[in-house]
Amino acid sequence: MTDQPTSLAGLDLREEIDRLRMERNAVILAHYYQKPELQDLADFVGDSLELSKKAAETDADVIAFCGVKFMADTAKILSPEKIVVLPDMEAGCSLEDSCPPEKFAAFRERHPDHIALTYINCSTEVKALSDVIVTSSSAETILSQIPEDQKIIFGPDRHLGGYLNRKFGRDMLLWPGVCIVHEAFSERELLKLKAEHPEAPIAAHPECPPHIIDHADYVGSTSGILNFAKTFPGDTLIVATEPHIIHQMEKALPEKIFLGAPGADGNCNCNICPYMALNNLEKLYLCLRDLEPRIEIEEGLRLKARASLDRMLEMAAGTIGKGDLGRV
Ligand code: 13P
Ligand code: SF4
């Protein structure tokens, strides 16, 4: 929109965002890995499954998605009549990048007797090539509904898939993708931190590699980890997932101590998701003002992707708020 001012100097961005939210009849959804200022002004903060449900249910005209692109794509797949904007279209995901649709299609063709159970952290094209989508909080419930003799391809996260294989004695064929954030946690640094706080349990996301999971007292989705933080009996918790989730923990339990698990040199920022970090207040304001950048999906592709997401929502019914994969 060319008639809009380009300088943001002097604007109270929070006030402007509130004004635009009303004017546009917009809902602001945010993932737990977003900057605290975005989490604080969102209408709803949640994990991937909860955010998908909110996107499917909302009666807003506009969804402003503070998260990464596959999450905003999911909102558009589920609510095609709505305008879905993402503050920064470059907010991708290493798991999505690891799984190009043409390679995934070829992999599926080489294994015609397998179904594809696919983590939601993938492109719309890969969703369209899949049978059922899972999130980390719905994977256990969904996998338990699939007969044990059914052969399964699980992609793109080999750590989540490996965790599920170990926990449920399954033999799913794993796509070799990883999350660059959870992959960066250092076992040596984690053990050093644990030695300093021997009484502190470790809560880990299942995207972590096995050498981190093996030390965890609790393994679960972001909402599962948050629930664990609210209920564990001690006063210090080590959190092995993206550290922006600690904002919600500190808000709910200001008297407790939450320590982010360290990356390779113990002091780097490699445990911060660089894609999630692209969103900020300025870009949220601009996307509400301009209704750009906007998610658009070709209808035939959307319908195919919708089928595998609908299967997830049906099979996951009843798991909202539980977010719990337990412990291997
Ligand atoms: P959750 O579904 O647990 O929120 O995970 C999303 C994600 O991208 C973790 O890296
Ligand atoms: Fe993707 Fe990892 Fe970032 Fe989650 S934390 S969005 S899996 S890169």
Image (cartoon, rainbow, N blue to C red):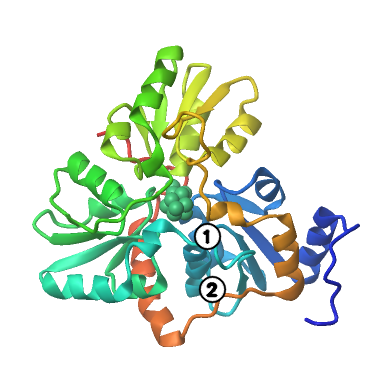
The residue depicted at 40 percent of the width and 36 percent of the height is 185
- Image quarter where the C terminus lies is top left
| Marks 1 & 2, CB-CB < 8 Å contact | no
Ligand 2 neighbours mark 1 (CB distance < 8 Å): yes
Q: Is residue 73 above or below residue 264?
A: below
Quickly name the residue at label 2: 79
Q: Quadrant of residue 146?
A: bottom left
Residue 323 visible? The answer is no
Kindly give the residue lying farthest to the right in the view shown.
10
Q: Dot 1: what SS?
A: loop
- Distance of label 1 from label 2 (alpha carbons): 17 Å
Kindly give the residue lying farthest to the front in the view shown.
265
Q: Dot 2: what SS?
A: loop
Could you tell me residue 77's position as x and y percent?
A: 47, 74
Could you tell me residue 158's position as x and y percent?
A: 26, 51
Q: Which sits earlier in the primary sequence, circle 1 or circle 2? A: 1
Q: How crowded is the residue under tag 1: few (<14 C-alpha within 10 Å), some, or many (20+)?
A: many
Q: Amino acid at mark 2?
A: Ser
Q: Is residue 208 above or below residue 9?
A: above
User: Of the numbered discs in the image, which one, if any, rests on residue 266?
Assistant: none
Quickly name the residue at label 1: 68
Residue 105 visible? The answer is yes
Q: Amino acid at mark 1?
A: Val
Q: Is residue 38 above or below residue 96?
A: above
Q: How crowded is the residue under tag 2: few (<14 C-alpha within 10 Å), some, or many (20+)?
A: many
The residue depicted at 63 percent of the width and 57 percent of the height is 279
- With 157 as the anchor, is 252 left or right in this view? right
The residue depicted at 28 percent of the width and 46 percent of the height is 159
Could you tell me residue 118's position as x and y percent?
A: 30, 61
- With 185 as the anchor, is 260 left or right in this view? right
